Amino acid sequence: MATALADSERAVLDPVPKGLLIGGKWREASGSRTLAVEDPATGEALCAVADATVEDGLAALDAAASAQAAWATHPPRERGEILRRAFEAVTAQANDLALLMTLEMGKPLAESRAEVAYGADFLRWFSEEAVRIRGDYSVAPSGKGRLLTMRQPVGPCILITPWNFPLAMAARKIAPAIAAGCTMVLKPAAQTPLCSLALARILEAAGLPEGVLNVVTTSTSGKVMEPLIRDPRARKLSFTGSTEVGRKLIEQSAAQVLRVSMELGGNAPFLVFDDADLDAAVEGAMLAKMRNMGEACTSANRFHVAASVAGDFTERLAARMAGLKVGRGTKSDSQVGPLIDGAGRAKVEELVADAAASGAKVVVGGKAMPGGGYFYEPTVLGDVPAGARVLREEIFGPVAPVSEFSTEDEAIAAANQTEYGLAAYVFTKDLGRAFRVIERLETGMVGLNQGIVSNAAAPFGGVKQSGFGREGGAEGIKEYLEIKYVALNV
Ligand code: NAP
């Protein structure tokens, strides 16, 4: 059944292209196959987009491969200016894009606006980086000969993005690829293809030549993408998604020894020491936990709190969580939207049930909400025992499990007790302790006395099974560049 949409919602949905973008042409999938995009606030269909086949996927790679040589020599300034124009267009259309995002993904409008700004920032950042691709020149240590290095585009890239940040994850890959002079095939998640399609249209209007960006949407991602990953014309895979799928794609990438960047799952610890500013810690906890309804790879997955302040922290956090307004993200007073689908919500229910059965106290929330859509109550769990699954697995929902520690060593050991290593949060007023702890944390990113780490100007990425490679910052463009060294006989 299709959702009854308001005129304003129809007005942002209708203009979005629903086809595949291949070689500069928007077209249907072979056999006119389509896939439905659902509103997670109602569980009902919003619209349908093209459902690519294996042949369509390969046609997209053909287009990227054909466009590569010309694009690699396109003047860097012009590559940057295309991105700059796209940044300005995204910024000008921020409200419409935010509504589109809320419709397909569920997050409240204020959060969608924040993601649009975050995504736009990657376009701006890499518009500036396009003209700063540098090599190196030095005298050989022997004094005879000179050493020259140059950086060149990797070549056609395969970009695969998740549903949780439908615009920013696409922009974070497309922008550096464009800046570096790479062509690409983007495959957004089937659940949230609309923001990527809208962004592709914006980049087209900003002057991106045909074939540089190709977009395929499909309900059979494994089947459609594997032949591309195994195709010798592809030179790079950049994937953001779960560790489970990432592992599979690393294996597939081995066939062609493809260059790979992996932005995978997380299990971020949030450490509150006894000297922390508790108001700031609760504020940071709300951001780190509730941004995106907890459906973020950087989401605080577990709260380790010094025993002397754990009761106070839990009480204050529970009061804030209980006060949140849950509802369809399009409503102006909604602060928490639905989860992405029934399976996501069922996993949250399972983790909470497991924690409760193993002795945790449900301080607030703890239940799925009745009615349509995939809403779940903002939840705080106290006294969560070390063995509970909720501490080990990615929750991807609005659930904050709190457990206590006694010493700094114990806190660090608990924080590192996971195969993941994406983000961590540390709250303390003692600078010496802050650095002691930060240096021992096994994560790619740390928020010190703040609950958010994302910034287009910083290198985003993880260690351990959270992946490898960095997006954003000065490092981001390097993922799309090869180094060529030239030995000069001079
Ligand atoms: P997912 O199931 O791994 O899917 C991610 C993307 O991969 C989607 O586009 C998906 O397409 C596609 N995909 C799935 N199976 C595939 C296969 N066999 N071959 C090729 N593509 C395949 O993850 P998700 O549920 O969308 O996203 C949530 C996960 O992403 C969480 O684990 C989260 O931590 C992680 N994440 C990490 C970062 C980071 O920067 N580290 C950022 C955001 C999210 P379909 O869904 O259409 O099948």
Image (cartoon, rainbow, N blue to C red):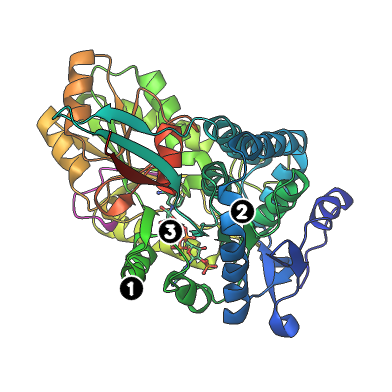
Q: What residue does disc 3 label? A: 236
Neighbour tally class for label 2: few under 14, some 14-19, many 20 plus, Cα within 10 Å? few
CA distance for labels 2 and 3: 18 Å
- Choose the circle earlier in sequence order: 3 or 1: 3
Q: What residue does disc 2 label? A: 70
Does the magenta run of residues contain 384?
Answer: yes
Q: What residue does disc 1 label? A: 255
Label 3 beta carbon within 8 A of ligand 1: no
Quadrant housing the N terminus: bottom right
288 shown above or below 236: above
Q: Which residues are magenta?
A: 380-389
Residue 260: where, in percent of width, then height? 37, 57
Taking the image as drawn, is residue 434 in sight? yes
Splitting the image into 4 quarters, where does residue 239 fall? bottom left
Residue 354: where, in percent of width, then height? 31, 61
For the residue pair 279 and 16, the one nearer the viewer reads as 16
Labelled disc at residue 84: none
As drawn, is 118 to the left or to the right of 240? right
Identified by mark 1, the residue type is Ala
Identified by mark 2, the residue type is Ala
> Do labels 3 and 1 touch, CB within 8 Å?
no
Residue 426: where, in percent of width, then height? 29, 28
CA distance for labels 3 and 1: 12 Å
Label 2 beta carbon within 8 A of ligand 1: no
Residue furthest out toward the front: 490
SS for dot 1: helix
SS for dot 2: helix
